[in-house]
Image: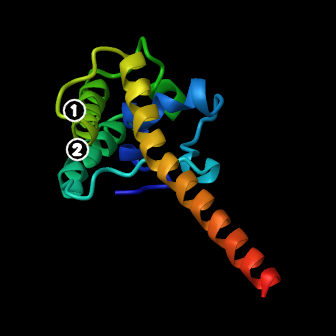
Amino acid sequence: MDRGGRNPARNARLHRCQRPDVMGNSAHYTAGRTGVSLRPPKDSDLSRLEPLAQAVLDARAAHPGAKLADLYDPDPMPPNLRRAHVTLDRAVDRLYRRSRFASERERVEHLFMLYEAITVPLGTQANVRRRRAARRKSKGEAS
């Protein structure tokens, strides 16, 4: 599914919408490098994405002389590529939420809620570990 380092599933709208406002204007999916990790729920069937991602690759292959910049220019984007991406985007969205997102803003807000749910427990656990370490240290000093 991954040709030349480009995985169409990682270019799904859910992941793309983070980049301009949250992670800068990078042309690459950078979530792993910035510490943001929004994995689909454990009960997700990711194998359903494979044929959809392959459809994106096939749609790209149908335009052999075109550069990616030309294929992804919003106005002249080939209809078959646009349809393949819309289908993939909807499938990726459904991994994170059953109902459709009404807007890009709603999608980003949902991503932030997921991110907060992931990071808040980590911060809480770190605070607990620090308190325990401080207690152990103070007990060691008191002995």
Furthest residue to the bottom? 143
Is there any visible trace of residue 42 in the rendered image? yes
Regarding mark 2 in the picture, which secondary structure is present there?
helix
Furthest residue to the top? 75
In this picture, residue 137 sits left or right of residue 108: right
Q: Amino acid at mark 2?
A: Leu
Q: Earlier in the sequence, mark 1 or mark 2?
A: 2
Regarding mark 1 in the picture, which secondary structure is present there?
helix
Measuring from the top left, give residue 93's x and y in whole percent: 27, 35
Quarter assignment of residue 46: bottom left
Measuring from the top left, give residue 37's x and y in whole percent: 49, 50
| Residue 94 versus residue 143 in the image, above or below | above
Q: Nearer the viewer, residue 74 or 71?
A: 74
Q: Are marks 1 and 2 in contact (CB under 8 Å)?
A: yes
Quarter assignment of residue 62: top left
What residue is disc 1 on? 87
What residue is disc 2 on? 52
Quarter of the image containing the C terminus? bottom right
Q: Nearer the viewer, residue 66 or 106?
A: 106
In this picture, residue 117 sits left or right of residue 102: right
Q: Residue at x 54, y 53 (%)?
A: 124
| Residue 60 versus residue 137 in the image, above or below | above
Quarter assignment of residue 139: bottom right
Measuring from the top left, give residue 99's x and y in whole percent: 18, 27
Q: Residues within 10 Å of mark 2 (few under 14, many from 20)?
A: many
Is there any visible trace of residue 66 in the rendered image? no
What's the CA distance linking mark 1 and mark 2? 7 Å
Furthest residue to the right? 141
Q: Residues within 10 Å of mark 1 (few under 14, many from 20)?
A: some
Q: Amino acid at mark 1?
A: Thr
